Image (cartoon, rainbow, N blue to C red):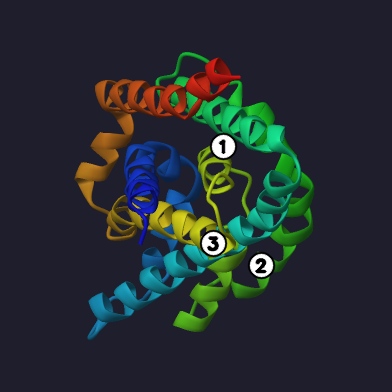
Amino acid sequence: MQPELYLSYSSAFVIGLLGSTHCLGMCGGISASLSMALPVGKGFRLRQTLLLMAFNFGRIGSYALIATLVALLSTQAASQWRWAGLLLMTIAGLLLIFMGLSMGQWWQGIRFVERVGAPVWKALSPLTKRFIPVNNAGQALALGALWGWLPCGLVYSTLGWAALQPTVPAAALTMFFFGLGTLPSMLATGYAANWIRGIKSNQSFRKISGVLLILFGLWTLPFQALLMH
């Protein structure tokens, strides 16, 4: 595997970790509700784990699918037009910067970007009612797969990063690793861990994460490529 792909996958994982507080706001509630709907008794923890893992891997699978669809267009555009690569890098960098500003609670312009996916979510969201309440792993997987299409600035920001990958499978893997980065906080929310609520309300964590995301975005912007042209 090319070294730059390792960097992309690890960076996507870190972005997922840094975006934990945003994930808690967008998906944490539904993740916690999976546990609350289960009757406490013998095998509760095992059933809880199965539902949480199924839901989250359904969600992550949708991220990879969306990245596949985006990459089918972006890789073709980059191969046909020389300027397309620079445009994609600029969009990816700006989205990460916008997400960092939102995480740090300095500017919420990323909400305008989230409106892009609103029509798709409007069509899919009624389907989620078919799987609520969740009684088994299959329902949790289907619900997670639908929930992965929820308009989310953090997802869109990382999709911009994924669109820069040289191949469609690499783009899908980038979003898969991003999803893995969001997994710890989402699982902790499902287990109703008290410390995760502390992270969500910790202003220092949000601001540090915001600054790091902004740095990721600045690093992605094609300054060097523009200077060479």
In the picture of the structure, the residue carrying the numbered disc 2 is: 129
Q: Residue at x 58, y 61 (%)?
A: 168
User: How crowded is the residue under tag 2: few (<14 C-alpha within 10 Å), some, or many (20+)?
Assistant: few
Mark sitting on residue 64: 3
- Classify the position of the C terminus by image quarter: top right
Q: Give left or right: position of 10 versus 122.
A: left
Q: Residue at x 53, y 56 (%)?
A: 171
Task: Mark 3 or mark 2: name the one nearer the start of the chain.
Answer: 3
Amino acid type shown at disc 3: Ala
User: How crowded is the residue under tag 3: few (<14 C-alpha within 10 Å), some, or many (20+)?
Assistant: many
Q: Give left or right: position of 15 versus 27.
A: left
Mark sitting on residue 46: none
Amino acid type shown at disc 2: Lys
Task: Mark 2 or mark 1: name the one nearer the start of the chain.
Answer: 2
Q: CA distance from mark 2 to mark 1?
A: 24 Å
| Element type at mark 1 | helix
Amino acid type shown at disc 1: Gly
Q: Residue at x 35, y 78 (%)?
A: 50
Mark sitting on residue 153: 1
| Residue 11 x %, y % | 35, 43
Vertical arrangement, residue 23 with respect to residue 144, above or below? above
